[in-house]
């Protein structure tokens, strides 16, 4: 590659573009950060507020433009959209969040994710599935000429808007009473109330502020990108990367990180194809991988982000679990009998042709959920990105089967190997963090795996995915694959149970309860958690490989965030405190999805409602409810 | 030879000298109390010995071997046991499992994946619970214990690895007066019978003056006095900096 | 003696599912200093938190200054004129000393019906704080933080000061200073409710005492007779 003036111009052009994108990212991340600081809730629906701001603005601009003229109409639409989202944020805080401030972190994350699902379907219902283009920004539609290149005026404006909001927020926090209250409440909200401050009102105001800033970020983008249904998740993933890189709770950090991430992306696009020796890399297709590399690099050097501070240790759950007890003899015999019955299921294929198909789906879901539960329950690590290892397993197996023509068992093993490698690599970063930081990082990693599957068309088939992944003999019949899966899943569940009760499992539960005490006893906490993470990822990879063979294909859609969330819902629906929980939850959710949710276009809203029901009504899940029943029965005279 | 030798420890935070060259030793079977006003550098000193903080200058020697700056889990393996100001045990395990977990860690069997942990080190764990008076609670979840019992469980776990040195950060904080003295007496018995060296910080003066063998007084990151309890009690500088006239130290209600 | 300023009758309180307080009754009269005495875990802190509405509680009667506070949120209780100095001080460590004090001063709102404290009066009482107004709360020593926590409570112009174990984790010499300060506040007419394990502190400040054990009231009476009970009775109410 030669360093000529056209490259320099391209770099400059892209860097202005980068600053403009950074402003959008910053607005979302800053709102996320402020809300987290005061309420301790990571708002998974924050990307949705951005999306609503954008939809609101593109809808309002022409209408207000007709009344006020295009100039004023444009800016009035931006302001109204931001304000509208702020009001909606206040409403959400009053109606939903106030009920979950005392709940465990995981439930808070899931409840706000349910909100994301509901908003997503509400937008689909209100605006339809088509992208909507916004108007050009009046007065800023031209270009500024710099070094012989035309820079879009609006990009320059946006590039300046970010620092302006940063300065405004900084002044607000440092100088105003509202800002002092925010900083005080960030540290100790109870004490703020005990000093006579109405903290409920303060929380509502903070949530509205954060939502409004995100809405503003979305509305300002209307001249640059069309409103579409996918941006809630993509913006959320980017915002998580920014917050993790910048450090949770640091507004300054959010800006620096947003610039860093956006600039590296812009640089990749500006450089385009780079040749090193005989190899050619198309960097513009690797923007998401670049994002990952920045995040990984920062986390190696500063585990809590560039400007972050280690958070005070928050106990894993409000109340600790009851000690796990091994199963008694009757329960073991019942399990064996159940297993034998399941093995006989293919005989029923004549009467219920669909039964083995549904049962195979359930088995895959059980393995997926049980592997997640291993790190969530005994490990205390709430992963929001378990789909990554499912995806690695599925793509690994599919590639080995199609591109290399490997026999089915070998291909499955290859998939498991890929998932294991991924879990070892990502796990090294993840296990060093706790709580919401861990949740965000796992989600960011999963987004990266998804993006690679989506962007690396030559290998992964891009958005279409890989086809013709059919198993060979003897797994090519429904019964054959089902029985193989049954054996594999049963073995995996047995292994998980043994491990939980083995010294390793004891150490894992110990690290969850008190990492301070574990370290003081000489237990290498990070290594214990790392191994657990890697084992869970490996088993999850097996589930992914089975999935690819069961469906005959694998596409990015099957490994998106919603799969990670499905896993969490399964574990919680079943009950996180019991090893039976994920099994119950996985079968229930698979059944529901198969029979209820496929009947409607608005399945996201339905899933959201289900999540909210679990979080608000039955936090112990099915297993918890059963335990309570048994407890009552035991108490009865 | 001393079990613990600390020499010239210094640590500054953002220009503020928290610890400015502190040296002392603790011998086998000895209880050394580290006292001083808040901000005197007790915690810093303690956390350096325990491996949580790396000093700017100075060395920490354990049984003659230099261990400065090693992380807590390495310290644990070299023979340092520790209890915390707010006792830390594993709430979701039973009392017996808590001690078993400590013994399994000491035997480096943490990464065994198959064999049930319940069968490992059962008798030793039971024995430790007997020594600390916790045998009756063996099957109970640790989360249900009264705070005094949590402290005793923590002690059982801290000595499970048969350490050379026991570090106790305010061992009697948050306990009732009768419990306080019982706990420190238990520590003293274990110290004598096992030849343990104990370094502890404490705000409760009846505990310090009733049971410590020697006392080191820190103020402003420097040692202002050290010696046996009578000498410390009589030291005018210590009275001025820390103890006061004694009217507030008239025992705990 | 004047009418009670704080009346508590049949107070129960919970932490999560665990019940901590059982049918506790006590009162504080105007201008009086009252001690809650008992070992750790007895429920002293929970009593004070229950008073402030910081834990789930229920009471037959919970009246402060003639107002039923049983169903009021924490901030409304504080505004009636209760200055809360919590266990562990709970200073806002990221805020400066001046900012910590500002939080409690609500501009435009009526004070807590008690005597107003000007900054000058406050700094007369705590000369140390005057010198370190721009210092971050986190950069202060434990004793200094304790003073700031007390000063912060005074800014809201309380009628009743609620102090949770001010002597815990503080050097004896600082405890002595604190006894003098709290004594001076009492002399100025403030009512005081003090939870303590340090008997000497209670004895120097308080008129009456309630002894709590395992969430129940075990003994109550004038401070002097508790003193006698300790000296002459081996089966003292504390054991």
Image: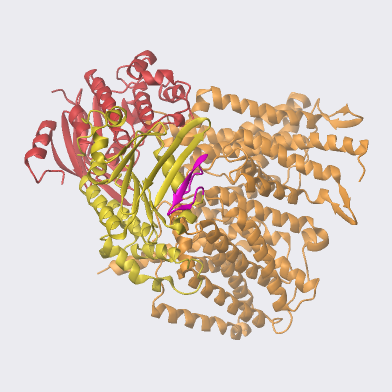
Chain colours: A orange, B yellow, C red
- Residue depicted at x 9% and y 46%: C235
- The answer to whether any part of residue A175 appears in the image is yes
C179 or B30: nearer the eye?
B30
Q: Please provide percent x and percent y for residue A352.
A: 61, 80
Q: In the rendered image of this protein, does residue A584 appear above or below residue C99?
A: below
Inspect the magenta stretch and tell me whether residue B52 lies in it.
yes
Is A284 on the left-hand or right-hand side of C11?
Answer: right
- Residue depicted at x 28% and y 67%: A635
Q: Quadrant of residue A256?
A: top right
Is C214 on the left-hand or right-hand side of C85?
Answer: left
Q: Quadrant of residue B163?
A: bottom left
Is A541 on the left-hand or right-hand side of C160?
Answer: right
Q: Please provide percent x and percent y for residue A92.
A: 54, 41
- Residue depicted at x 59% and y 79%: A487
Q: In the rendered image of this protein, does residue B122 appear above or below residue A14?
A: below
Range of magenta residues: B50-69
Q: In the rendered image of this protein, does residue C106 appear above or below residue A213?
A: above
Seen as rendered, the residue at the extreme left is C232
Q: In the rendered image of this protein, does residue A69 appear above or below residue A336?
A: above
Inspect the magenta stretch and tell me whether residue B165 lies in it.
no
Q: Please provide percent x and percent y for residue A127.
A: 70, 45
B75 or C57: nearer the eye?
B75
Q: Quadrant of the C terminus of chain A?
A: bottom left
A431 or A625: nearer the eye?
A431
Q: Please provide percent x and percent y for residue C107.
A: 43, 19
- Residue depicted at x 34% and y 26%: C150
A23 or A94: nearer the eye?
A23
- The answer to whether any part of residue A58 appears in the image is no
């Amino acid at each position: 590659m030669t360093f000529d003036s056209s490259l320099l111009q391209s770099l400059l052009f892209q860097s202005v573009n980068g600053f403009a994108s950074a402003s959008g990212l910053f607005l979302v991340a800053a709102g996320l950060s402020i809300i987290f600081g005061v309420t301790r809730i990571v708002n998974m629906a924050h990307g949705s507020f951005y999306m609503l701001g954008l939809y609101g603005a593109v809808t309002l601009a022409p209408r207000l433009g007709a009344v006020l003229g295009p100039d004023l109409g444009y800016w009035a639409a931006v302001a109204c959209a931001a304000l509208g989202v702020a009001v909606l944020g206040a409403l959400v805080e009053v109606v939903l969040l106030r009920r979950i401030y005392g709940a465990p972190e995981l439930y808070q994350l899931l409840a706000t994710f349910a909100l994301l699902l509901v908003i997503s379907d509400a937008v689909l219902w209100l605006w339809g599935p088509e992208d909507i283009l916004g108007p050009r920004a009046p007065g800023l539609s031209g270009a500024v000429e710099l070094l012989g290149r035309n820079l879009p005026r609006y990009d320059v404006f946006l590039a300046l808007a970010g620092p302006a909001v940063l300065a405004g927020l900084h002044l607000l926090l440092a100088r105003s009473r509202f800002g002092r209250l925010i900083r005080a409440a960030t540290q100790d909200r109870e004490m703020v109330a005990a000093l006579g401050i109405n903290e409920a009102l303060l929380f509502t105001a903070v949530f509205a502020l954060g939502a409004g800033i995100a809405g503003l970020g979305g509305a300002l983008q209307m001249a640059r990108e069309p409103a579409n249904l996918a941006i809630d998740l993509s913006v959320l993933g980017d915002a998580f990367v920014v917050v993790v890189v910048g450090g949770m709770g640091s507004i300054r950090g959010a800006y620096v990180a947003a610039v860093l991430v956006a600039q590296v992306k812009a640089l990749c696009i500006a450089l385009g194809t780079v040749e090193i020796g005989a190899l050619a890399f198309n960097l513009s297709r690797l923007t998401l991988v670049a994002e990952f590399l920045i995040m990984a690099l920062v986390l190696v050097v500063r585990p809590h982000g560039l400007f972050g501070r280690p958070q005070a240790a928050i106990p894993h759950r409000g109340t600790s679990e009851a000690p796990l007890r091994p199963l008694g003899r009757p329960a073991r015999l019942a399990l064996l009998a159940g297993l034998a019955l399941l093995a006989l299921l293919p005989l029923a294929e004549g009467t219920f042709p669909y039964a083995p198909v549904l049962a195979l789906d359930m088995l895959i879901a059980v393995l997926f959920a049980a592997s997640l539960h291993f790190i969530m329950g005994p490990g205390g690590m709430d992963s929001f990105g378990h789909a990554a290892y499912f995806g690695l397993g599925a793509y690994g197996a599919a590639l080995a089967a199609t591109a290399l023509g490997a026999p089915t068992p070998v291909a499955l093993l290859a998939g498991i190997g890929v998932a294991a490698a991924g879990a070892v690599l990502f796990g090294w970063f993840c296990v060093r963090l706790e709580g919401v930081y861990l949740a965000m990082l796992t989600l960011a990693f999963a987004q990266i795996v998804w993006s690679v599957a989506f962007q690396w068309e030559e290998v992964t088939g891009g958005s279409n995915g890989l086809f013709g992944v059919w198993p060979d003999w003897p797994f090519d019949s429904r019964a054959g694959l089902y029985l193989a899966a049954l054996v594999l899943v049963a073995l995996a569940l047995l292994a998980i149970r043994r491990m939980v009760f083995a010294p390793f499992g004891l150490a894992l539960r110990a690290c969850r309860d008190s990492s301070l005490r574990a370290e003081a006893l000489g237990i290498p906490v990070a290594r214990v958690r790392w191994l657990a993470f890697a084992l869970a990822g490996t088993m999850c990879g097996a589930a992914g490989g089975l999935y690819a063979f069961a469906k005959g294909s694998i596409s990015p859609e099957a490994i998106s965030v919603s799969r990670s969330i499905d896993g969490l819902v399964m574990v919680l629906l079943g009950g996180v405190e019991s090893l039976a929980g994920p099994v119950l939850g996985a079968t229930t959710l698979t059944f529901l999805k198969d029979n209820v949710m496929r009947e409607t276009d608005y399945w996201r809203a339905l899933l959201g409602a289900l999540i909210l029901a679990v979080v608000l009504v039955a936090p112990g899940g099915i297993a918890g409810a059963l335990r309570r029943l048994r407890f009552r029965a035991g108490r009865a005279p | 030879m001393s079990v613990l030798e600390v020499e010239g420890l210094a640590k500054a935070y953002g220009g503020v000298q928290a610890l400015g060259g502190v040296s002392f030793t603790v011998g086998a079977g000895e209880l050394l109390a580290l006292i001083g006003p808040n901000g005197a550098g007790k915690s810093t000193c303690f956390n350096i010995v325990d491996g949580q903080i790396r000093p700017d200058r100075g060395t920490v020697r354990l049984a003659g071997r230099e261990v400065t700056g090693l992380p807590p889990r390495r310290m644990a393996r070299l023979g340092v046991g520790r209890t915390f100001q707010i006792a830390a045990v594993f709430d979701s395990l039973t009392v017996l499992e808590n001690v078993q977990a400590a013994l399994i860690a000491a035997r480096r069997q943490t990464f065994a994946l198959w064999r049930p942990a319940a069968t490992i080190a059962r008798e030793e764990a039971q024995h430790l619970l007997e020594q600390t008076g916790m045998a009756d609670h063996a099957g109970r979840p640790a989360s249900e214990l009264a705070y005094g019992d949590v402290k005793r469980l923590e002690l059982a776990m801290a000595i499970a690895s048969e350490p050379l040195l026991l570090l106790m950060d305010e061992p009697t904080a948050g306990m009732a007066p009768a419990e306080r003295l019982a706990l420190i007496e238990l520590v003293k018995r274990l110290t004598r019978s096992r030849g343990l060296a104990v370094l502890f910080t404490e705000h409760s003066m009846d505990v310090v003056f009733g049971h410590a063998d020697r006392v080191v007084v820190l103020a402003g990151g420097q040692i202002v006095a050290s010696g046996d309890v009578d000498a410390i009690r009589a030291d005018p500088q210590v009275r001025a900096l820390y103890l006061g006239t004694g009217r507030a130290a008239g025992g705990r209600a | 003696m004047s009418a009670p300023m704080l009346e508590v009758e049949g107070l129960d309180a919970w932490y999560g599912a665990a019940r901590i307080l059982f049918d506790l009754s006590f009162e504080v009269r105007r201008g009086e200093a009252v001690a809650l005495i008992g070992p750790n875990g007895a429920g002293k802190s929970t009593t004070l938190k229950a008073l402030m509405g910081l834990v789930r509680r229920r009471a037959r009667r919970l009246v402060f200054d003639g107002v039923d506070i049983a169903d009021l949120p924490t901030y409304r209780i504080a505004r009636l004129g209760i200055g809360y100095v919590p266990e562990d001080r709970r200073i806002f460590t990221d805020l400066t000393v001046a900012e910590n004090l500002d939080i409690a001063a609500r501009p435009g709102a009526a004070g807590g019906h008690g005597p107003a404290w000007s900054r000058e009066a406050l700094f007369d009482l705590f000369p140390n704080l005057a010198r370190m107004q721009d210092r971050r709360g986190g950069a202060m020593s434990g004793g200094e933080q304790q003073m700031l926590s007390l000063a912060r409570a005074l800014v809201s112009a309380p009628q009743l000061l609620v102090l949770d174990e001010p002597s815990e984790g503080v050097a004896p010499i600082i405890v002595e200073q604190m006894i003098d300060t709290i004594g001076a506040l009492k002399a100025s007419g403030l009512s005081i409710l003090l939870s303590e394990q340090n008997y000497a502190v209670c004895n120097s400040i308080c008129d009456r005492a309630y002894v709590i054990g395992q969430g129940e009231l075990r003994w109550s009476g004038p401070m002097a007779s508790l003193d006698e009970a300790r000296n002459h009775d081996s089966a003292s109410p504390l054991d």
